[in-house]
Image: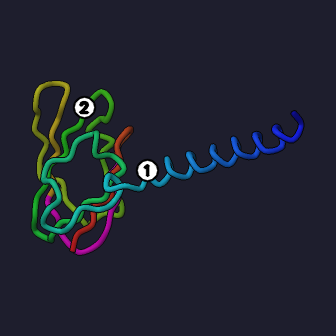
Amino acid sequence: MRTSLLVLVPSILLGGLILFGVSQMGGTSSKNAPCVLGTCPLSLHESDSGQTFIYSAGGRFSVFLDENNNPRSDLTCAPDGVIALRQYTFAEPPTYVAVFETKTSGTCVLTDKNFSATIVVK
């Protein structure tokens, strides 16, 4: 009985570590990998939070966010100068659309209360 416990307990611990490692590797799948320049979506949504998007200078993209979860007044991209807000429009309330133009090469982090995306301009 004691010998079987000495084999069983480490086996369970090792199995748990393996499962944990596999689940962590799954979290670094394509969802977190940046899209390729020219294939990135032009419409970003709350579900895209945590991802990186790469655009060419002079392009435009839109961000669709819920005003209740991500107020327009809190939406910023730091550092300044990489992208510029062109306009706000409204979709079906409470969703608003922020239209941005990519200005110059660089990287900024577009954030709001419950949204964050890395924007890379090449």
**Residue 69, placed above or below residue 108:** above
- From the image, state whether disc 1 or disc 2 is nearer to you: 1
Does 68 sit left or right of 98 as displayed?
right
* Quadrant position of the N terminus in the picture: top right
**Residue 68, placed above or below residue 4:** above
Between residue 55 and residue 40, name the one nearer to us: 40
Q: What's the residue type where badge 1 is placed?
A: Gly
Residue carrying label 1: 27
Disc 1 is placed on an element classified as loop
Q: What's the residue type where badge 2 is placed?
A: Asp
Q: Residue at x 14, y 71 (%)?
A: 57
Does 78 sit left or right of 62 as displayed?
right
**Residue 52, placed above or below residue 94:** below
Asked if the magenta segment contains residue 53, the reply would be no
Q: Residue at x 28, y 46 (%)?
A: 48
Q: Quadrant of residue 92?
A: top left
Q: Earlier in the sequence, mark 1 or mark 2?
A: 1
Q: What is the x, y in percent for residue 3?
A: 87, 41
Disc 1: CA contacts within 10 A as few (<14), some (14-19) or many (>=20): few
Main SS of the magenta segment?
A: strand
